[in-house]
Structure formats: structure tokens, C-alpha cells
Image: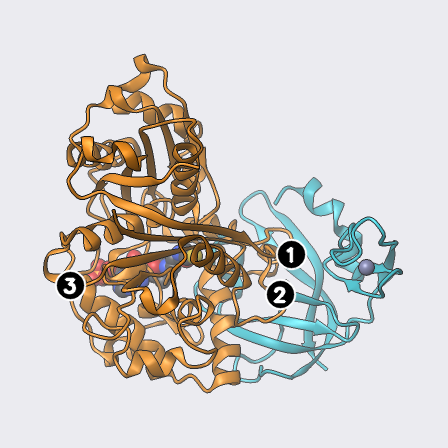
């Protein structure tokens, strides 16, 4: 296998973007990534695009070809493939792109993610997202995504004594980081009280425990490491890559509070990267709900089960803490355009490692991403370092 | 969910019919046609569940999709049947009453209704035992 580097990154602002269509979101992110890599479109060998549900959000399938076409590449006839794993679609598109370059099959490959969620109303969105769970045995029972993660939270609080305040602190911290990110949907710091008094969505989770409904796209460009310096002075190397699956339904997990696919994907990425937990400078984790961030920190092996709430409360995971989690603001503050999120995590990690992250800049050599589909039926992790 | 798609699982949903692996003794509801422990060595037979069990975890759903809006707010739970298998269900009880460990028993109820097409789906739900 060849070594692989990220040579360019692009991301739209995330938010409720009434003025942007599905295809324009992608074109915007793609153009930013090409510009960043100083690359012309004709040099691209292949595209992978993560997208969860354009079919239901904008009644459009056949996303690979659509995107290649509107990126101005129809006449180049390059392969373009859509990748779907619910909210992990973006991370998975990145893994496919990585594999394509590492294997020698393609040289210059785009990994993108895009989702246009706000053209339908919230009830439809809730139902579309529910398709990431088991439609026949969870969907028919009336689950919602906030509801599934709420059941993780209920059990977790019962078992480990996690407090409502500790959970809320995850949101406070992520909004604080988001306030420093010009691409974030929410750029205002919030107080603990705002979270604690927000509307209940699925007990014990409230509005401010949830990632919002978002439009956005992100794109990154990969190349073999040996060619990376043709395009950039700051290539970021992919050190490790791990993907895992688990039961589609939450009720079939051995332990409701552990995303075993996170454990497996994280371990694979660490083994491949040959780095230790203590070498990691920051992690972009999949905080679709506050409880998800708590579980991620533990399941990735950064602390024991039951300890992440206390660490969060003590500031261990804040920007100035020992292990900053979600310097971008995470899904909570950046917003969560489901197919785009996994690629946005890579975008943030590359920005940080290049020293290009503006006001939220960290001093770190190695960063990690963690992208989850459903309640943990698919998990994709990557570890990055400077080349 | 289309009527045909629902009908295919109707016997399971009406009568809590799942499966049982005679090789290792595991029970499955929702039914599985293939035992994840024994794989090709598993011998799968139908099994009618008693339906009694307990709440493993729960939430109160206050914001739902179109098909379940009429029910909000409703308690949703992961239930462990006494045979050891787990499922997800609406528990019909006061939203303040549900708690971890609560014993439940099955009842036959409306599961969901499909907008203006009028299709109504029935099946098994749970109430405090
Ligand atoms: C929680 C949720 C149901 C709220 O949706 P909603 O009730 O339609 O909310 P609205 O769009 O009416 O927003 C009401 C206000 O709250 C704000 N808001 C909405 N969601 C928010 C969130 N998650 N965090 C903070 N503020 C939020 C809006 O900006 C709006 O503010 P405004 O009145 O100042 O404009 C929705 O965001 C949701 O479903 N989130 C989860 C998404 C999900 O499941 N993703 C997949 C995860 S795996
Ligand atoms: Zn068996």
C-alpha cells in the first residue's frame, strides 16, 4: 500500500442555507478544495461522495454522476461514486478515497460529503433520519434519533451517575468552540442554564443536547504522499484508518452504553498508525447528541467507562484542556449535514495540523476523527499527522 | 411502511412470534432467520414469546415524525423479554411512571397510522405488569 496525504480541503459555511441548492453546495466545497490544492479539475482521477438521503431530502438519486457533471467534469468521464452509511457517509467516502489512492488504483481523488436537509420540514427530517435505525423493528415502535440516544443517556446516567449538568457541559464547551469557527451554524457561546432550560426533545435530552438540522458540504483531496508536494507545502498524512460495524438496532447491543463499533474502529486506526492514545493532540468526535460525545471519549480509549462526564466538567476536553475534543465546535455547534459531517471532521483536522485554524488553533502534531452512522452500526476513524 | 411490507411480519407482530436457535438455545425477537452465534450450524425454529419482561432503558419522546405525532409525549423503551432477547417498544403508561427495571406485559394495540392513505398498523405493545 502507498502512503497517502491530504493536499487540499474545502468546506461551505454550515447552516440553514435557503439560497443554496444541493448541487451548488457541493460545487462550492469542491471549488474551495481545488483552489486550496492549487489543482485544476482535469487532474482529478476519481470522486467519492458521502450522502445519506438526497432521495428523500431533495428527491434526487444518482448523486455521483450529478456531482461530477456539475463540477464541470462530465466531459472527463471520471468515475464518481456515492457512498452511504447514514451519518457516517462522509467518513466512509474518505476511507474509500484513501483506499483508492493507497492501492494505486487512482492518484488524485476527491472525498466529499453533502446534505441538503432543510428543504423538507422537521417532521419529515425526523422520519428520514430514523431510516438510519432499523425501520422494521425500531422505526415501527416510534423511535426518533434523539430518542435512541436518549435511551443511551438514561441507561448511562443510571449506571454511572452522570449528571444532567455534566451532559450539558458538552454542549456549552462545543458552542464555545463553535463561536471561534466562521463556518459553524451556531457561533454564540451559551450558558449551562440555556441547555438546562431548553425544550425537552426526548428525555433526558433537550434541544441544546441535539445537533441541529443543517445544509452543507465539504470536500478534501487526497494524493499519494510521494506526489503531495507538487500541490502543497503542508501535506497532511493519513496515519491510520479504521472502520467497523455493529448491530443496526440499539436493542441488540451487548452494552447499551458502549458503541462497540467505535471501540473496534478506534483500535484498528491506532494499530495502523502505530501511535498511542497519549500521542493524540485533539479529536473531532461524532457528538450528534451530548451523550454521544461522552461515549466516544470512553469508547476510543481516552478514559475508563463512566469517567468522561467528570473530565468534561473539569475542562479536560476544552480547547485549553489536556485533550481538546471537537475544536471545530462539533456537530452540536457546526451543525450536522449528515453526509458532509465526516468530511468536515477531516477538514478541521487538516486545518489544525497545518496551523491554519485561526482563533481555535491548537498546538498539536496528531489529530483524530470519529464518525458514526446511526446509533453506532457504522463507525469510521482516521488518524492524521504532518508529513 | 407499505401494507404488503407490514403484512409480511404481521403474524410476528400480532402474536410475538420470534425464533429460537435449538443449537445454542438463544431466542430472537425481532425474529432472526440466522443465528449470529452458530451461523450455519444453528437450527432455527419459530417461538411464541410469553411477552413478559422488564424495561432496560427508556425515553419520553416529545417530538416525533408524522406517523407518531398523535402519540406525543410517549414513553419508548428497550425491553428485555424473560427469554433474554431485547426489543424496542412504546410502553403505554403515564410518562412519569416508567423506570428502569419496571416489569411489563404485552397488549395488542395500534402501532402507527399512515397519513391520509388511512392505513393503520396493529401489533404488540407493552403495559406495566
Ligand atoms: C432538535 C430538533 C428536533 C429541533 O428542531 P425544531 O424543533 O424544528 O427546531 P426549530 O428549527 O423550530 O428551531 C427553533 C429554534 O432553536 C434553534 N435550534 C434548532 N435546533 C437547535 C439545536 N440543535 N441546538 C441549538 N439551537 C437549535 C433554531 O435556530 C431556532 O432558533 P430561532 O427561533 O432563534 O430561529 C432538530 O434539531 C433535530 O431533529 N435534531 C436532531 C438531528 C438528528 O437527529 N441528526 C442525526 C443524528 S444521528
Ligand atoms: Zn445459535
Q: Quadrant of residue A83?
A: top left
Between A283 and B79, which is closer to the camera in this rendering?
A: A283
Asked whether the residues under the numbered discs 2 and 1 touch, taking CB atoms below 8 Å apart as contact, a structural biologist would say yes
Q: Specify the quarter for ligand 2.
A: bottom right
Between B84 and B109, which is closer to the camera in this rendering?
A: B84
Q: Position of residue A8 (x, y in %)?
A: 22, 38
Q: Which mark is residue A179?
A: 3
User: In the orientation shown, which residue stands out farthest toward the top?
Assistant: A75
Q: Which residue is mark 1?
A: A137
Q: Secondary structure at mark 2?
A: helix
Chain at numbered mark 3 = A
Q: Position of residue A41 (x, y in %)?
A: 23, 23
Q: Is the residue B119 above or below the residue A169 in the image? A: above
Chain at numbered mark 2 = A
Colour applied to chain B? cyan
Q: Which residue is mark 2?
A: A251
Earlier along the polypeptide chain: callout 2 or callout 3? 3
Amino acid at each position: 500500500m502507498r502512503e497517502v496525504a491530504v493536499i487540499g480541503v474545502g468546506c461551505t459555511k454550515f447552516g440553514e442555507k435557503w439560497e443554496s441548492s444541493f448541487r451548488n453546495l457541493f460545487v462550492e466545497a469542491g471549488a474551495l478544495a481545488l483552489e486550496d490544492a492549487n489543482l485544476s479539475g482535469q487532474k482529478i482521477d476519481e470522486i467519492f461522495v458521502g450522502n445519506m438521503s438526497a432521495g428523500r431530502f431533495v428527491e434526487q438519486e444518482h448523486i455521483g454522476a450529478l456531482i461530477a457533471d456539475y463540477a464541470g467534469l462530465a466531459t472527463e468521464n471520471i468515475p464518481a461514486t456515492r457512498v452511504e452509511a447514514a451519518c457516517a457517509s462522509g467518513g466512509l467516502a474518505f476511507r474509500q478515497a484513501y483506499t483508492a489512492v493507497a492501492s494505486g488504483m487512482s492518484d488524485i481523488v476527491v472525498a466529499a460529503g453533502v446534505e441538503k436537509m432543510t428543504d423538507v420540514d422537521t417532521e419529515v427530517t425526523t422520519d428520514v433520519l430514523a431510516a438510519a435505525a432499523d425501520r422494521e423493528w425500531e422505526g415501527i415502535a416510534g423511535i426518533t434519533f434523539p430518542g435512541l440516544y436518549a435511551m443511551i443517556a438514561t441507561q448511562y446516567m443510571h449506571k454511572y451517575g452522570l449528571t444532567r449538568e455534566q451532559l450539558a457541559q458538552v454542549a456549552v464547551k462545543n458552542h464555545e468552540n463553535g463561536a471561534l469557527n466562521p463556518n459553524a451554524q451556531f457561533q454564540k457561546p451559551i450558558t449551562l442554564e440555556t441547555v438546562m432550560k431548553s425544550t425537552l426533545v426526548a428525555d433526558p435530552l433537550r434541544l441544546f443536547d441535539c445537533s441541529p438540522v443543517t445544509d452543507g458540504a465539504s470536500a478534501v483531496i487526497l494524493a499519494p504522499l510521494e506526489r503531495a508536494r507538487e500541490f502543497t507545502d503542508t501535506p497532511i498524512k493519513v496515519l491510520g484508518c479504521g472502520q467497523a460495524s455493529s448491530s443496526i438496532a440499539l436493542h441488540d447491543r451487548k452494552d447499551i452504553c458502549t458503541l462497540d463499533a467505535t471501540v473496534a474502529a478506534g483500535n484498528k486506526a491506532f494499530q495502523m498508525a502505530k501511535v498511542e492514545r497519549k500521542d493524540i493532540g485533539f479529536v473531532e468526535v461524532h457528538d450528534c447528541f451530548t451523550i454521544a460525545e461522552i461515549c466516544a471519549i470512553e469508547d476510543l480509549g481516552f478514559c475508563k467507562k463512566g469517567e468522561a462526564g467528570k473530565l468534561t466538567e473539569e475542562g479536560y476536553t476544552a480547547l485549553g484542556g489536556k485533550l481538546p475534543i471537537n475544536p471545530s465546535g462539533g456537530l452540536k455547534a457546526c451543525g450536522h449535514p449528515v453526509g458532509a459531517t465526516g468530511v468536515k471532521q477531516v477538514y478541521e483536522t487538516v486545518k489544525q495540523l497545518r496551523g491554519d485554524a485561526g482563533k481555535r488553533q491548537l498546538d498539536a502534531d496528531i489529530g483524530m476523527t470519529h464518525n458514526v452512522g446511526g446509533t453506532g452500526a457504522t463507525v469510521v476513524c482516521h488518524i492524521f499527522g504532518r508529513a | 411502511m407499505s401494507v404488503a411490507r407490514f403484512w409480511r411480519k404481521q403474524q410476528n407482530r400480532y402474536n410475538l412470534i420470534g425464533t429460537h436457535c435449538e443449537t445454542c438455545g438463544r431466542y430472537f425477537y425481532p425474529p432472526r432467520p440466522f443465528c449470529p452465534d452458530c451461523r450455519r450450524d444453528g437450527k432455527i425454529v419459530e417461538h411464541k414469546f410469553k411477552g413478559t419482561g422488564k424495561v432496560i432503558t427508556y425515553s419520553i419522546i416529545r417530538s416525533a415524525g408524522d406517523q407518531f405525532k398523535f402519540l406525543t409525549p410517549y414513553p419508548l423503551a428497550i425491553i428485555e423479554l424473560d427469554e433474554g432477547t431485547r426489543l424496542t417498544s412504546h410502553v403505554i403508561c403515564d410518562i412519569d411512571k416508567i423506570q428502569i427495571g419496571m416489569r411489563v406485559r404485552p397488549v395488542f394495540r395500534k402501532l402507527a397510522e399512515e397519513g391520509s392513505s388511512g392505513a393503520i398498523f396493529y401489533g404488540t405493545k407493552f403495559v406495566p405488569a
